[in-house]
Image: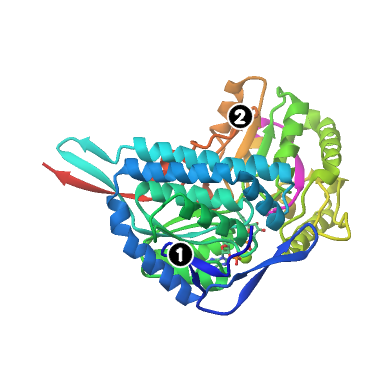
Amino acid sequence: MKAHDGMYIGGEWRAAAGTDTIAVVDPADEQVIAHVPAGIAEDVDAAVFAAHEAFPAWAATPPAERAARIAALRDVLVARKDEIAETVTAELGAPLQFSQMVHAGVPILVAGSYAELAASYAFEEKVGNSTVYAEPVGVVGAITPWNYPLHQIVAKVAPALAAGCTVVLKPAEDTPLTAQLFAEAVHEAGIPAGVFNLVTGLGTVAGQALAAHPGVDLVSFTGSTAVGKQIGATAGAAVKRVALELGGKSANVILPSADLAKAVGVGIANVMGNSGQTCSAWTRMLVHTSQYDEAVALAAEAAAKYGDRIGPLVNAKQHARVRGYIEKGVAEGARLVAGGPEAPREQGYFVSPTVFADVTPEMTIAQEEIFGPVVSIIRYEDEDEALRIANGTVYGLAGAVWAADDAEAVAFARRMDTGQVDINGGRFNPLAPFGGYKQSGVGRELGAHGLSEYLQTKSLQF
Ligand code: NAP
Ligand code: MG
C-alpha cells in the first residue's frame, strides 16, 4: 500500500500538525520503504476532540447496528488480507506465510467475534429490584506495539467499538503502515466519522500526549512493562481506567508422563513463530531431570531445522538487545546448543534460532523478557520444584503444560500464577480472556471479558 502523509481524524486524512516524519524500515534488508508523519500533541488534541464529538451518537447507536459495522470491518479485512499480510511482512519482517495465517488471519477472527458479541451481549440485566445498564466508558486512547501490529489494534478497537466507545490509536513507530491500512478499512466499512482516529508518531511524544490527555477516559496499552508502569501511574493520577498488557516469561512445563518429542517440538515452534517477538511465548522449557538430555537434543534439532525460515527482528535496537541477552547467557554459564549471538546474515536484523541448556532459574535469560528467538531449558527434580520455577518470575502471562492425560496437566496448570495455559497443545481461542497475572498486566482482552473492559455499569433501582 501507499503510505498516507496525514492523520486519519474525524473520518478523513488530515494534514499533520508538525513536519517531522518517521522512516519505516524493512527489517529484512534495512531499506527505508516509506515515511509517515510523526504526530505531536496538537494532532492528539484534534483526534481526541473528534472522538469526543462522535461519542454520544455512537454510544446511542443500537448494538445491532454497531455489530453490523464491525461485521463490515471484518469483511474489508477479509477482502484485503493479502495486502495486510504483505504490509506486515514489509514492516515487521515476518515470513509471508506466517503473516497470512497469523497477522492477517487472527484479526479477522477477532473482528468477527466482536461483530457477534456486540449483537448478543447483555448490555442490560435485572438484579433484584435493579436494572443494570452496561454503558460505554467514553473515549479510548489505544497504544499498541509492533509485534502483532494488526492483532493488537483489532483486539482493542473492535471491543471498544462494540461497547459504544470511540477511539484514538497511537500505533508503534515501527509498524505504522499496518495501522494506516486499518484506518482505510474502518473508512471503507462505513464506520461513522470520528469513531476511530489514528495518530502516528513516537511513543514519547504522541503516545505520552494521548495517555495524559484529559479528554481520554480509558487508556489501553500493550507493550513493555517499563512503559506500562509509567502509563499506569499517569492514568492512576487522573483516576482514569487503564488496561495494561505487558511482558511475559512463560513456562512450557513438560511433566514426565508427556509425549516429550511433541512437547519439545511444539514448544520450539511456539517461540520461533514470530522470531520470538511474542509476549506470551513459552521461552522457558521446564524438563524433568530424567528426560533432560533427550529434551535438549530434540530442542537443538528442532531449532536447527528452523534455520532460514525465521524472519528478522523488527529493528536494529531489538537486534542488538537480543544478541546482548544471548551473550549474557553464555557469560552466566548457560550452554549454547543451537544458534548463538553471531548475526547469521550480513543484511537484515536476523538472529539464529537459539537454544540454551543448563539454564538455572535465576539467570538473566531465565528471568527477563528477551523478545527474540531464544529458548532456555531448565531442569527440575520434582513437580513442586517445577511449580516454583514456573512461578518464579515477576511475570504471569501464559504457559503450557504437557502430561499423559489432561487431568494431570490441569492439576498443575491450576497452581500456576498465569493468565493462560495451553493444555497438551490446546489451540488458540479468540474468545478466551487474554491477560496477565502479576507484572504481566491489568485487565483482559478478547471475548466477552475484553468487551467488559470498555463498559461501566449504571444501576437503576425500582
Ligand atoms: P514500548 O516502548 O513499550 O512500545 C509500545 C508502545 O508504546 C509503542 O506504540 C510505543 O511507541 C509506545 N510508547 C513508548 N513510550 C511511551 C510513553 N512514554 N508513553 C506512551 N506511549 C509510549 O516497547 P518497545 O520499545 O517497542 O519494545 C521494548 C520491549 O518491550 C521489547 O523488547 C519487549 O520486551 C517488550 N514488548 C512487549 C510487547 C508485548 O506484547 N507485551 C510488545 C512489544 C514490546 P514507539 O513505537 O514510538 O516506541
Ligand atoms: Mg519504544
382 in the magenta segment: yes
State the residue position of label 1: 12
Q: Quarter of the image holding residue 391?
A: top right
Which mark sits nearer the N-terminus, 1 or 2?
Answer: 1
Relative to the observer, which residue lies in front, 386 or 228? 228
Q: Residues within 10 Å of mark 1 (few under 14, many from 20)?
A: some
99 left or right of 164?
right
Give the image location of residue 201, x and y in percent.
57, 69
Q: Quarter of the image holding residue 418?
A: top right
Q: Residue at 52%, 74% (x, y): give it.
A: 16
Residue type, mark 2 in image: Gly
318 in the magenta segment: no
Q: Residue at 58%, 41% (x, y): give it.
A: 106
> Taking the image as four quarters, which one is ligand 2 found in?
bottom right
| Disc on res. 426 | 2
Is 33 placed above or below 165 here? below
7 left or right of 427?
left
Which corner quadrant holds the C terminus? top left
| Disc on res. 136 | none
Give the image location of residue 326, x and y in percent.
80, 55
